[in-house]
Amino acid sequence: MPTINGLDVKREIADKRPKSINGVVAVLSGFARSCLSLERRGGGGLRLCLDCQTEFVREYIAKLMNEAFGADAMDGDRNALVYDDCERLLSELKITDDNGDFIDGIPDAFCRSSHYARGVFLGCGSMSAPQAEGVRSQKSVGYHLEFSFNSDSLADGFAELLGGYGIEAHKSTRAEKNVIYVKDSESVSDCLALIGADKAVLRLNEAVAALAVKRDVVRRMNCEIANMARTVNAAVGITDAIALIDKKRGLASLNKKLYEAATARLDDADASLSEIAERLGISKSGLKHRFDKIIEIAGSIDGEKPDTEGQ
């Protein structure tokens, strides 16, 4: 069965360049807002630090930063980008306003931007894949995509952004982080489509279809096993009743119809009710009625009616 995880999604996103400069800025703003930190320079100014986590994301963001703002990162950690021109970049990314204060939540320019959502996933998104083993209900097999924010207002704003595209999002708190997540296959698929991960959508849909087929096979097998168990229980019950009558009174004490039913059961202990009924040329309900009568007779002999569960 096809599998997919968060790194696969990020690699697919990093293979795409937004078609417009506004799209580039939106991706960069969403990314930076979800994973930035500030550090003090020796001269008192600030440096902008972006935690890229992986090398391929670092290369992608560095390229877009240079393309959009002519910004070159300083030498530093191989999975982080550090920029000296912090104040200008924060303003260009619409993370701070004209006064240099941080904007609360998502800027108005990006509150309906799929590119911004793409950048946020690169910065703080993750996804757990459906598992091939252990067929369970669709909601319990691991369809889960989430975004982890430091800011409560940013988390709420992002939930509203997803809601604007008809994607139902949920919120929780984990390790002092504000987590926005979607948890069923349809919502996850819609969210992947929103951020431009088309290949991931196809693979996820394949996984959903494969699990649906497997669940159906298991369901059918369980039904067959249950039917077999009922057949066995019924056969055991009637066989015990026939044996008791034979021991106490003899089968010849039964009338012709009951005798035929009893001997047919003894001749083939593994046969189903339908098979015996067909052999005798009677209906299944007719045979069941005869077996019920035999069990009733055995019960009167034994002083206690045997368990007829499964009949």
Image (tube, rainbow, N blue to C red):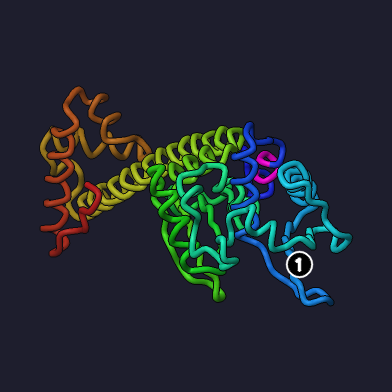
Residue interval drawn in magenta: 9-13
Is residue 266 or residue 159 the one in the foreground?
A: 159
In the rendered image, the vertical position of residue 295 relative to residue 202, given as above or below: below
Is residue 44 or residue 212 the one in the foreground?
A: 44
| Identity, as a three-letter code, of the amino acid under mark 1 | Arg
Is residue 94 or residue 159 the one in the foreground?
A: 94
In this picture, residue 1 sits left or right of residue 51: left
**Image position, residue 305 (x, y; %):** 15, 59
**Image position, residue 48 (x, y; %):** 73, 64
In this picture, residue 279 sits left or right of residue 23: left
Question: Residue 70 lies in magenta, yes or no?
Answer: no
User: Which quadrant does the N terminus fall into?
Assistant: top right
**What secondary structure do most residues of the magenta stretch adopt?**
helix
**Residue ID for mark 1:** 47
- Give me the residue at 38% from left, 38% from top: 270
**Image position, residue 70 (x, y; %):** 78, 46
Is residue 77 or residue 221 the one in the foreground?
A: 77
Question: Residue 11 lies in magenta, yes or no?
Answer: yes
In this picture, residue 117 sits left or right of residue 25: left
Asked which secondary structure carries label 1, the reply is: strand
**Residue at the front extreme, as displayed:** 99
Q: Quadrant of residue 50?
A: bottom right
**Image position, residue 83 (x, y; %):** 78, 60
- Give me the residue at 12% from left, 52% from top: 296
In the rendered image, the vertical position of residue 259 relative to residue 58, given as above or below: above
- Give me the residue at 46% from left, 45% from top: 112
- Give me the residue at 56% from left, 47% from top: 116
> Would you call the spot at circle 1 few (<14 residues within 10 Å), some (14-19), or many (20 or more)?
some
In this picture, residue 117 sits left or right of residue 138: right
